[in-house]
Image: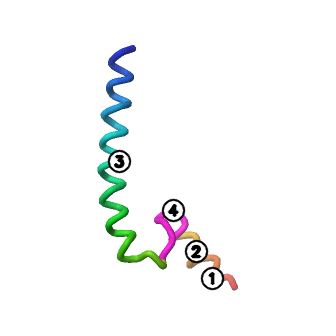
Amino acid sequence: MSESEEEKRQRKLRRDREHKFDEDEDEEYEDKPPRGRREKRPRDDAED
């Protein structure tokens, strides 16, 4: 089980690093929502 915990820790560290990069990109487009909602937003607006 120790391996699973270690893998989870490494995955979290990797995700944190990726999130840091995403945050830098998000800073440029603060007005735009996150990726998941970014795709849903334009469609809702189109319906309106």
Q: Nearer the viewer, mark 3 or mark 4?
A: 3
Mark 4 to mark 2 CA distance (whole Å): 9 Å
Where does the image place residue 23, in percent across and percent down from the top left? Answer: 37, 63
Where does the image place residue 15, in percent across and percent down from the top left? Answer: 35, 46
Image mark for residue 16? 3
Secondary structure under tag 4 reads helix
Which residue is label 1 attached to? 45
Residue 35 belongs to magenta span: yes
Mark 1 to mark 4 CA distance (whole Å): 15 Å
Which residue is label 4 attached to? 36
Q: Residues within 10 Å of mark 4 (few under 14, many from 20)?
A: few
Q: Which residues are magenta?
A: 32-38
Q: Residues within 10 Å of mark 3 (few under 14, many from 20)?
A: few
Q: Is residue 31 left or right of residue 8?
A: right
Residue 48 picture quarter: bottom right
Which residue is label 2 attached to? 41
Q: Is residue 18 left or right of residue 35?
A: left
Q: How many marks?
A: 4
Residue drawn 59% across and 77% down? 43
Q: Nearer the viewer, mark 3 or mark 2?
A: 3
18, above or below 37, in the image: above
N-terminal-most mark, 3 or 2: 3
8, above or below 29, in the image: above
Q: Amino acid at mark 4?
A: Gly
